[in-house]
Image (cartoon, rainbow, N blue to C red):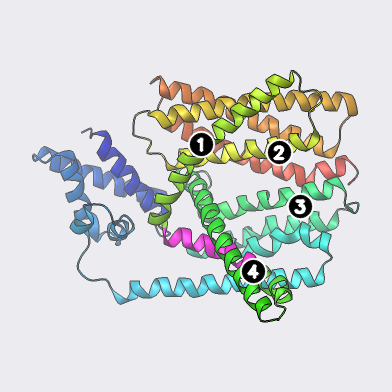
Amino acid sequence: MDVDAAVESQIAQWRGYVERHHAISAADADEMEDHLRSQISDLSAAGLMDDEAFLVAVKRMGSMGGISREFAYEHSDRLWKQLVLPPAASTASDAQPRRELIVVLALAVGAALAVKVGSAVLDEQAFARNAALFVLPFLTGYFARKRRMSPRAATALLVPYVLAAAVLNGYPFRPEGSTEVIAAIHTPVVLWFVVGLAYVGGRWRNDRRRMDFIRFTGEWVVYLALLGLGGGVLVGLTVGAFDALGMDAEWVIADWVVPFGVAGAVVVAAWLVEAKQNVVENIAPVLTRVFTPLTIVMLLVLLAAFATAGTVVGVDRNLLILMDLILVLVLGLVLYAISARDPHLPPDLFDRLQLVLVVSALAVDLLMLVAMLTRIAEFGFTPNKVTALGLNLVLLVNLAWSARLTVGFLRGRSGFSATEQWQTRYLPVFGLWAAVAVAVIPPMFDFA
């Protein structure tokens, strides 16, 4: 029996929560969803409305491992919370968050100590190359533990870190050379995909789990920014207070507080996203809807500026770098907007704004490609040009197909799930290109 779009949305959200639970496999989630739909069908046949049938079905499933109970706690604003939650919680479940907090704090301190030791042992350039290796293994370990990965699978996650360390410290980079900077910038991108493998519990072929990781990344950025802003204000006030007392505290801030704060915030922000998902889901989508129209205005202004200039041949190198950063920002907005959208709802105004954003970014990308190819024809290939050219080509394919799928969705020719699948399945391409930038481009240009 078919159910209406609103209940399909509720089922999808319930299914998404079930799949994020560390103890539930994809097969288990399929079985639970089938059982839920069967309950809804039976209740609807008995005369209940679809939404009423959903509420009662979730209530009846409350005994299945406590999943429905936890889902109701996470979505505390839902009416059916009162229908699902029993009156009292067990003391064992209350102890679990405390144990996790202790683990998180231990990992955050471990990351901070690793950064401190690394900065003391390595010179400035070597530390900058290896910075991600001091922090991200602890974040990977957090998710490997939380998802209860097997020891063998968790150990396998160390292999990319070992390979990255071998490349970054084995390659004979020229001091302050371009390839060293390229490797330092792209290594965190490669290793973030390793974090993603731990986040999805090794189920990297699952589109839904990949989309969850995209959502997590957006929410993690929000929390990390909030922690950074709050920490910056606190540090500024502390330094000002010590200055007023005639005491110098800047060396303590620079040598201890900043390294510990930055490294620890990476792990703590991830824990906050996991622990407070219902709060972040109210913040991040709002930010996406605010910055999407602002970014559209910025892109249109830039396109108008290029049209006024009449040529892109003499575009400044720094402008090309800035434009690439803007295009990466656009990609982030598109990905997070997709991850935060209910796929069962019909097209709305924001979907049309997304199309304008993608098309504007596509036009800018094409202009940047023309400018880059012109500079390459005039001055030849360099590591920076090849890296930027590759990134723009990867973005071009993503944006072009995204525009096509969005047009199809707006015209009713395809569902929104096609856009979701395209983005989740194309995501590894960015990781592969980052790996090429780290491991292949430096020897191509003799590590210059």
Q: Mark 2, residues whose alpha carbon is within 10 Å: few (<14), some, or many (≥20)? A: few
Q: Which residue is mark 4?
A: 111
Residue 394 at x, y percent in the picture:
66, 32
Q: Which residue is mark 2?
A: 322
Amino acid marked by disc 3: Ala
SS class, disc 2: helix
- Which residue occupies the foreground of this view, 315 or 426? 315
State which quadrant residue 253 falls in.
bottom right
Q: Which residue is mark 3?
A: 184
**Disc on the earlier residue, 3 or 1:** 3
- Which residue occupies the foreground of this view, 304 or 41? 304
Check the image and report above or below for 440 versus 107: above
Q: CA distance from mark 2 to mark 4?
A: 31 Å
Question: In this image, 37 relative to 203: left or right?
Answer: left
Check the image and report above or below for 389 versus 17: above
Observer-side mark, 3 or 1, equals 1
Q: Mark 1, residues whose alpha carbon is within 10 Å: few (<14), some, or many (≥20)? A: many
Q: Which residues are magenta?
A: 260-276
Q: Is residue 144 visible?
A: no
- The residue lying at 65 percent from left, 63 percent from top is 135
- The residue lying at 49 percent from left, 25 percent from top is 405
Q: CA distance from mark 1 to mark 2?
A: 18 Å
Q: CA distance from mark 3 to mark 2?
A: 18 Å
Q: Main secondary structure of the magenta part?
A: helix
SS class, disc 1: helix
Q: Is residue 266 magenta?
A: yes
Amino acid marked by disc 2: Leu
Instruction: Please tell me the numbered disc located at residue 292.
Output: 1
Residue 38 at x, y percent in the picture:
21, 43
